[in-house]
Amino acid sequence: MEYENKSNTAAPSPTERCNTSKESANYSADRKNYSTDSANYSADRKNYSADSNDGPGSPLPLSKSGEKSAADKERKFDERYLRMADIWSENSYCTRRKVGALIVKEKMIISDGFNGTPSGFENVCEDENGLTKPYVLHAEANAITKIARSGNNSDGATLYVTASPCIECAKLIIQCGIKRVVYGEHYRLTDGIDLLRRAGIQVDYIDKTKL
Ligand SMILES: [Zn+2]
């Protein structure tokens, strides 16, 4: 439901109703935070890339003209993973909105997901009125639960997701030990992002329309 956009003319969900009075103000405030995030992005990336895989003992970063710094390289990886998540969203059978997610740990993609019904259910996300069925799993939830069935674990991983996580997915993200979230599209409700930040998870926004 959280993935439905503003142009939705159907009755708001209970969650949406609870938030309507504050959501505009929160949204503006959050946009400001996002701007700050962008400004700090390069600095953050430098720290994040301190253990970059340029080989043992190699000096960082290389700053000769034309050569990419470690931060630039990290940013490129982020953009490419997000693009991959966007391509992965094309697997979704949902017609209202398609969302893709990837979980990356130690430079390996350890899981993937897109929004859809649980295994064994029909591949139809919307009911006869065009509303998303309540049992549709979000892309993040599918990627996280896929790990539960594998030999991997998500502790310390990064989640790339094409849309801003909702509060239900934010809870799962926190509990499964993901330490960083990169998302590609804002949503008017920011409670999911707010919860992630409260839990100390690094949250970065990259505009996927510019990738
Ligand atoms: Zn969600």
Image: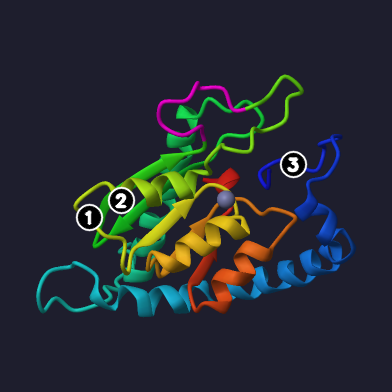
Which residue occupies the foreground of this view, 136 or 159?
Answer: 136
Residue bounds of the magenta highlight: 116-125
Where's residue 186, x and y in %? 66, 54
Q: Does residue 149 belong to the magenta stretch?
A: no
* Label located before the other in sequence (2 or 1): 2
- What residue occupies the far right of the structure in this picture? 21
Q: Residue at x 36, y 75 (%)?
A: 48
Question: For numbered disc 3, what is the local secondary structure?
Answer: loop
Q: CA distance from mark 2 to mark 1?
A: 6 Å
Q: Give amino acid for label 3.
A: Asn
Q: CA distance from mark 3 to mark 1?
A: 34 Å
Q: Residues within 10 Å of mark 2 (few under 14, many from 20)?
A: some
Contact between marks 2 and 1 (CB within 8 A): the answer is yes
Query: Which residue is the site of mark 2?
Result: 147
Give the mark toward the camera: 3 or 1: 1
Residue position marked by numbered label 1 in the rendering: 152
Q: Position of residue 146 (x, y in %)?
A: 34, 45
Q: Give the residue drawn at x 29%, y 71%.
A: 64
Q: How many numbered callouts? A: 3
Residue 5 is marked as: 3
SS at mark 2 in the image? helix
In the rendered structure, which amino acid carries the disc numbered 1? Asn
